[in-house]
Image (cartoon, helix red, strand yellow):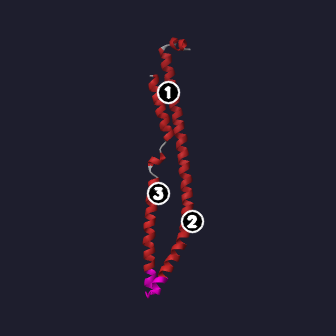
Amino acid sequence: MALETEARPLTELIGGLANDVSTLFRKEIELAKTETSEKVSQLASALVLLGVGGVLALGALGVILAAIVTALGAAFVSMGMDPTGANSLAAAIVGVIVAIIAWVFVSRGLGGLKAGNLKLDRTTASLGRDAAAIREKI
């Protein structure tokens, strides 16, 4: 087999190498497309689940917060505050606490959507291996 390779003309070897590199490049593009499609699909699924969970949680949170405001307002009234002032103060306290908690969750969620989490790891590794193989042959 080694004798056959040595007997082939240089132009044929270069043509074969160009063809191999072209085929390799096309396959790498296909891999990148497939991996990108998988990542987009994962992201879309996660966003749908996040949306549905968010809507349900928002409804439940509204009911729970209303109960907390009512209970806190009743506690303030029992301490001798005017009912209107007690309800306003209770709503303000609960609103500020919920806003702080929401800010923490949104900050963490945005951190999870960084571009680094959406890298095409397999494609990058494969391209690195292919480049090394081409350098080795040249």
Identity, as a three-letter code, of the amino acid under mark 1: Val
Which percent across, then down, holds residue 60?
56, 69
Q: Dot 2 lies on which element?
A: helix
Answer above or below: position of 9 versus 43: above
Answer above or below: position of 59 versus 13: below
Identify residue for label 3.
109
Identity, as a three-letter code, of the amino acid under mark 3: Gly
Asked if disc 3 and disc 1 are in contact, CB closer than 8 Å, the reply is no
Q: Dot 3 lies on which element?
A: helix
Which percent across, then down, holds residue 65?
51, 73
Q: Which of the marked residues, 3 or 1, is nearer the chain's N terminus?
A: 1
Looking at the rendered structure, which numbered label has been put on residue 97?
none
Side of 107 relative to 36 (left or right): left
Identity, as a three-letter code, of the amino acid under mark 2: Leu
Looking at the rendered structure, which numbered label has been put on residue 21?
1
Alpha-carbon span between mark 3 and mark 2: 18 Å
Which residue is pictured at 44% across the width and 51% down the height? 114
Which percent across, then down, holds residue 53?
56, 62
Find out whether residue 132 is within the magenta segment: no
Alpha-carbon span between mark 2 and mark 1: 52 Å
Q: Which of the marked residues, 2 or 1, is nearer the chain's N terminus?
A: 1
Residue numbers of the magenta segment: 74-88
Identify residue for label 2.
56
Mark 3, Cα crowd under 10 Å, few <14 / some 14-19 / many 20+, is few
Q: Which of the marked residues, 3 or 2, is nearer the chain's N terminus?
A: 2
Which residue is pictured at 44% across the width and 47% down the height? 116
Which residue is pictured at 50% across the width and 17% down the height? 12
Asked if disc 3 and disc 2 are in contact, CB closer than 8 Å, the reply is no
Q: Main secondary structure of the magenta part?
A: helix
